[in-house]
Image (cartoon, helix red, strand yellow):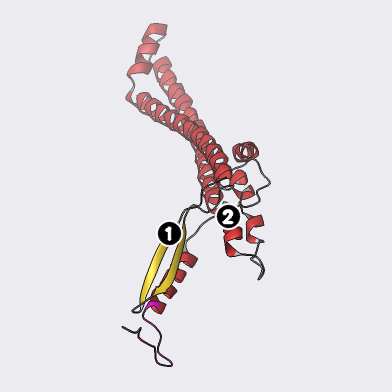
Amino acid sequence: MSAKRCDKGQQPRFVPLLLGMALAGILLDTPVSPLEAQVAPSPTTPIEEIADVPPPIDVSPGEAFLRAALIPGWGHASIGSYTRGGFYFAAQTATVYTLLRARTRIGTVQDRVRLTEQVILSELASSGVTDPQAIRDALDGDTRLNGVRRLLEARQEQQEDLVALGIFLVLLSAADAYVSAHLARFPDPLDLETSAAPNDGVDVGFRIALPN
């Protein structure tokens, strides 16, 4: 049985499939190192040799860990992982901003607590109450003061949660930069190969490259 021939101006059936696969590969966001982006295949260099060469990363995993712990996103940017670096930078910046606002609100509520206590003490003094135990009981039983105190406790708990979240993000970012720096030295783990097959078909193959 002879293979079908394509008339002039008529594309084989597998051409749209190849174009779609190529467009999907372009749209995928895969972080690359800046030095890797400068390495372009020359006409005399086999494609197999370029695929097996790890990207030249000058930053060690330990250095990436320290940079990510010092400045949000620095460790990831140094290995070319700009998307991850931007995420950690935005997350840690938002956490710090929220923490500063929480501290400002705590100061405001503390002023309200002191002002409410002064008002209650003035009312007790005008009523002739001088016993220390009676004054403490009056302060503890006042609904206005208790409401402001509960608000202060809620603000302080929020501050503690934000501090814990900030520490967690720093450690997570540093650990992620450390692991990403290790993985950046590995060759591409999976390579997709396509070729034309008889009867206007397409052969699809996968190649897995293992590190040396």
State the residue in front, 66 or 112.
66
Q: Element under label 1?
A: strand
How crowded is the residue under tag 1: few (<14 C-alpha within 10 Å), some, or many (20+)? Answer: few
Disc 2 marks a residue whose amino acid type is Asp
* Above or below: residue 159 compared with residue 18: above
- Where does residue 110 sit, x and y in percent of width and height? 48, 28
Does the magenta segment cover residue 10?
A: yes
Q: Element under label 2?
A: helix
Name the residue at 66% across, 68% down: 42
State the residue in front, 27 or 2.
2
Q: Which circle's residue, 2 or 1, is located before the other in the chain?
A: 2
- Where does residue 98 sit, x and y in percent of width and height? 49, 41
Quadrant in which the C terminus is drawn: top right
- Where does residue 172 sit, x and y in percent of width and height? 50, 37
Disc 1 marks a residue whose amino acid type is Phe
Quadrant in which the N terminus is drawn: bottom left
Name the residue at 44% across, 22% down: 117
Q: Which residues fall within the magenta stretch?
A: 4-14
* Above or below: residue 43 compared with residue 169: below
- Where does residue 177 sit, x and y in percent of width and height? 56, 42
* Location of residue 39 (image quadrant): bottom right
How crowded is the residue under tag 2: few (<14 C-alpha within 10 Å), some, or many (20+)? Answer: some
Q: What residue sits right under mark 2 in the picture?
A: 52
State the residue in front, 116 or 44.
44
Q: What residue sits right under mark 1 in the picture?
A: 206
Residue 128 seen in this snapshot: no
